Image (cartoon, grey):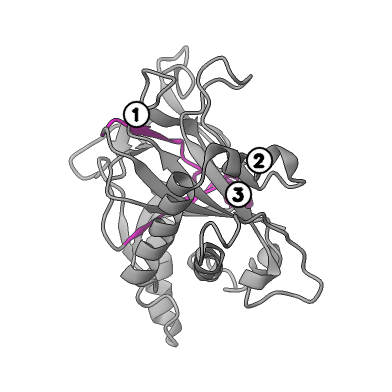
Amino acid sequence: MAEYWKRQVDGKEEIRTGLGWRPIVPGDGDLAVDQLPLVDLSDMSHEDICKRQVVAKKICDACINYGFFYASHHGLSDVEISTVFAESKRFFTELTREEKMELDTAKHDHYWGYYPSYAEGEHPAGANLNEGMNFGYEPSVDPEAREGAQGTNWWPQESRLPGFETNTKRHMTRVLTLSRALLRLFALGLGLDEHCFDDLVTEPYSILKMCYYPGTVAASKKPSSLRPHTDPELLTILLQDDIPSLEVLSKTGTWISAKPIPGTFIVNIGDSLSMLTNGLFVSTLHRVINISGRDRYSVPFFLGGQ
């Protein structure tokens, strides 16, 4: 617990955030600390700015108090969501380890590509009990791409996973568009011009990551997991399956389960956006522990500045 919690000499308790430490807020009857807020995005693009401001206010309140929120009515259909989950599962289960290692991140200039699971002792950073595949920004997925924009991903062979690249790129386009819309809502909720953050993400260092947390880890007695961390980017849009595994460090210093809610994304603030708001938006520690005994898949999208 020491890595994310401490007690000062005056007895005050603090928890770690992406920008340092903040005081623990004692729970009370009026403060819901055991669940994340849910924000309906139906009016995020409404022509009436007053309706957009209502959504923006709810989002900013969530970012200030939690750094996390569920987003419903985000514009992506159930079919689109099930398709990207199916593609993620195909990648991890249908390709051999050798085929996946041909896409090893260590060989890519921008660290895009595949990384394997490794048990304790096999890596200087310790155990990494999950697998992942990273796809970075490329102009072909960006409807607002500037002339000369660059970005080259590694893709599995079409003959091995027919349609994988097309379907994955389609999802990248959708979440990139959504993330830019969220940035405009953040600006509006802060009392700024809606487009004041646009220049940060005209050619963003973004990553779509497909994650696989196996139900059992062959080389370890521990469950598949991801260590407590914050995200360095501006924001993250997370698509998770039906297995409760994500946990968020609440303002009271306790871990709360970010249980999956069908039809929603989870959005969280990264260190960069926390810095841009002088710490008003909090970059919150979170972790993954899959104790279900079933394979878990998630697809986060990280929007970073260029």
Percent from the top left, x then y, of residue 235?
Answer: 53, 54
Nearer to us in this view, 79 or 249: 79
Mark 3 and mark 1 lie on one chain; the one further toward the N terminus is 1
Give above or below for 104 relative to 264.
above
Give above or below for 119 relative to 16.
above
What segment is highlighted magenta in the picture?
A: 264-292
- The residue that mark 3 highlights is 233
Percent from the top left, x then y, of residue 35?
Answer: 26, 45
Percent from the top left, x then y, of residue 218?
Answer: 40, 24
Q: Is residue 301 visible?
A: yes
Question: What kind of residue is marked 2?
Answer: Asp
Mark 1 and mark 2 lie on one chain; the one further toward the N terminus is 2
Question: What kind of residue is marked 3?
Answer: Glu
Residue 248: image quadrant is: top left
- The residue that mark 1 highlights is 216
Percent from the top left, x then y, of residue 155?
Answer: 62, 56
The span from disc 2 to disc 3 (Cα, nearest Å) is 22 Å
Q: Residue furthest left?
A: 29
Residue 82: image quadrant is: bottom left
Q: Residue furthest bottom?
A: 47
Mark 2 and mark 3 lie on one chain; the one further toward the N terminus is 2
Question: What kind of residue is marked 1?
Answer: Thr
Nearer to us in this view, 172 or 255: 172
Q: Is residue 267 visible?
A: no
Q: Residues within 10 Å of mark 3 (few under 14, many from 20)?
A: many
